[in-house]
Image (cartoon, grey):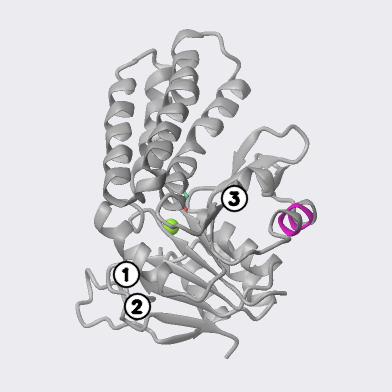
Amino acid sequence: MIAMKVMKFGGTSVGSIESLLNLRNIVNAQTKPVIVVVSAMGGFTNQLLAMCEQAQQRDISCLDVLETARKRHHDAIDGVVIDSMRDEVHATIDRFIDESLKTYYLALATNPHMPVDEIGRLCDAIVAHGEILSSAIVAGMFEDSVPHLSLNYMRTVPDGTGRVLDWEETERLVKSDFASMTDGVHVAQGFISRDKESGDVTNLGRGGSDFTAAILAALLEADSLEIWTDVDGFMTADPRTHPEATVIPTMTYEQAQQMCDAGAKVIYPPTIAPVAARHIPVWVKNTFNPSAPGTVIIDN
Ligand code: ASP
Ligand code: MG
């Protein structure tokens, strides 16, 4: 396997022009290839879901919120996307908003007798657009970007009332999608997936972009996984209530798993196991303070 790392940037890291410019500097400083996994722009996933609720109440003022979000994405494009790609990325954003999102919201708002499972499918398709739009912007920031679409290889199966990753099918598809890892910045969406049988758009659960990055790191045998977020790392205590809290420089996978399970919001809990099983080090780093050493999670 080729030497490479997976770098995941969360919602705040892709949420403003300032943070996207930090992301660009951080990624440009890497030896290529790298895989960059992105979340939706901060807050947009919540907005997409709130608009689903509104539309079901036949309140189409949700379309105003959509226009605010459109402007936010266009402003980001103007601030960060390279000249040669800017028009194309603007058009991509408009296409997804006008042809997909608006159509879906109007379908919800105008079909009072829509069966609940159809509503669920539509809302899953809607919420996937957070990552689809942010990844179009991030891919537009690099001359050497290679766009991927996580809907093409992340597969889930039903599990009780929820769903879980289908590791076997996902492994087969990921290995084929990333078979020729050319140099460059490979950009993929966190969170989003498809149902293995129906092909319906699904997701890995709220906060699931970390898990996407861990899955790619594990299946492609990455040298490391970096979770770029808005804190300096795992802390000894909650800094809001314990101002004396400090960053923990090194942790074991076990310790990190315990802290995540206990509610530390730094990493989505299912993220640890796949990388722990393959002894892939996980770095937690701050996009807004990239020179801070962060936390590294390793065997011991
Ligand atoms: N955008 C999704 C969420 O807000 C996934 C993620 O950010 O990890 O939950
Ligand atoms: Mg997160």
Give the camera-side residue of 253 and 130.
130
The number of discs equals 3
Report whether the residue tagged 3 is closer than 8 Å to ligand 1: no
Count residues near mark 3 (Cα–Cα under 10 Å), then give few for <14, some for 14-19, many for 20+: many
Name the residue located 49 percent from the left edge and 41 percent from the top edge: 132
Q: Earlier in the sequence, mark 2 or mark 3?
A: 3
Categorize mark 2 by other alpha carbons within 10 Å: few (<14), some (14-19), many (20+): some
Residue placed most toward the observer, 111 or 134:
134
Q: Which residue appears farthest toward the left when viewing the image?
A: 243
Residue labelled with disc 3: 148
- Return the residue at label 2: 235
Residue that numbered label 1 is attached to: 231
User: Circle 2 — which element?
Assistant: loop
Which quadrant holds residue 265? bottom left
**Gap in angstroms between the C-alphas marked 1 and 3:** 28 Å
- Residue stretch rendered in magenta on the structure: 170-175
Q: CA distance from mark 2 to mark 1?
A: 9 Å
Horizontal arrangement in the rendering, residue 176 relative to residue 119 (left or right):
right
Q: Position of residue 7 (x, y in %)?
A: 49, 67
Corner quadrant of residue 143: bottom left
